[in-house]
Image (cartoon, rainbow, N blue to C red):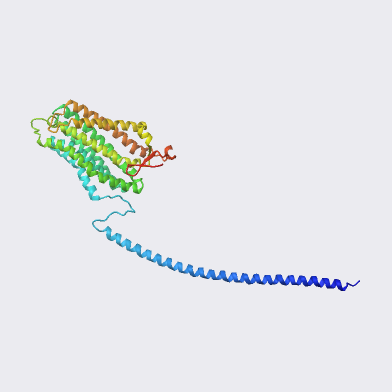
Amino acid sequence: MSPSLEDIASKLVILTARVDKAETRADNADARLVEADARTAKVEADNASLRERTTGVEANNAAVRSENADLKAEIEVLRAKVGKGPNAAADDGELMMRYSSRWRALLFVGGCTSTVFGVYGYAHNDERLSWFSVTLWAFSSVCLFGAAFGNPRNSRSWKEKLFIGICGLLFGVAALFEGLQLIAVVKNQATFNLGWTLVVGGITLMIVMPPAFIGANHLYSKLPDRHVSNTVKTTFKSIPQIAGSTLFVASASTRCLMKANLNDEPVAETCGNPTMPSFLVSVFLMFAWFLGYLIPPLLTGKTITWTDVMAIRMSKVEGTQFMLFGTLATFTLILFANTNEDGGDFNLFLQYLTAGFFITIISLFSLVIYESVAKPLLFPSNKTSNHELTTNPDSFNVNDTGALSIGSV
């Protein structure tokens, strides 16, 4: 049975609709292709523009690099010119901390003053010069401290270690020859006892001070650059003040020694007072300066709370140091109050005070050197204490110059 015309017509309609739909899809596809071509052209144009910009940036970078190279060359030339000048300073980047080689040399000469008087007095059997050596020992010690700690960044070179060791050795050499001369005099028991005290102390200082100086400089060299720089600058600025103070205190004993007639009586009877009290007072000033300027940089980062300060709450070691320093200050005050500038005998009371002073300062010095220098070198520890792991608004820490800075830790 053949299909009817109606069936054929309906199929034609369906086919026509399908063809129209296909043509519509083709038109849409063509439109999309045109749009894609337009986008591709735009992207290519953008890429070309970016390539042009990149080329320009690269050209600018090349020009900047060329200018930087020229500037670096000019800077090196200027540095070379400045380095050859009489007032040339060390490169801040290197931080060799040669604060001033001439000043260090001058301080070293000042540090030799007591040693020269002591050796010359012993060689020529001159008691007056030996007592001058005793009087100027604190001044020479301050100068030796300044000379030894003027270049911690270069403290690992053998030349610097040798220089530092010599500075430490001179501490004991002066005391040794002072004591030998006083023992040789043997005009009274006080002079004899003081002589042996200086001999034993001098030998001890000759053994202890060189490694202590080298070790302290080694610890300084490990500090951050800013801390080392501030420490050296602060120390050098303080030296004229403390050196002048020790000389002023020694002036009374110097006047008495210049007027004394040593043919009749020994120095201990004519100028024992003010010579010994003035000597011990100047030693206390020097030691207080040492504790205030040279030790605090080694305590950088240590955290303390105001509650601990106000309650005087401290460790056993800190408490012992506090008590010893208070005792030393008391001895110094009594000695200063009993100073007779017109000249007098080194009586038994002053001898007892001197013995107590020496025992106290030796104990305190030994404890400070062990805690601040020997212990960090012999028993290094990278552990962080508990107070450094917490934040406490009531705390403050020791900064690079040893001052106290308030804030959270």
| Residue 258 rendering spot, x and y as whole percentages | 11, 37
Res 242 → quadrant: top left
Residue 166 occupies quadrant: top left
Residue sitting at 19 percent across and 35 percent down?
279
Quarter of the picture containing the C terminus is: top left
Residue 211 appears in the rendering: no
**Lateral position of residue 1 relative to residue 234, left or right:** right
**Closest to the observer, 390 or 35:** 35
> Is residue 172 placed above or below 229 in the rendered structure?
above
Q: Residue furthest top?
A: 348
Residues 99 and 301: in front is 301
Total marks in image: 0
Residue extending furthest right? 1
- In the rendered image of this protein, does residue 42 appear above or below residue 168? below
User: Of residues 281 and 201, which is closer to you in this image?
Assistant: 281
Q: Where is residue 370, by image quadrant?
A: top left
Position in image of residue 139 (x %, y %)? 21, 40
Can residue 247 be seen in the rendering of this structure? yes
Horizontal side, residue 223 vs residue 245: left or right: right
Q: Position of residue 191 (x, y in %)?
A: 16, 30
Residue 234 place in picture, x, y as percent? 28, 45
| Quarter of the image where the N terminus is located | bottom right
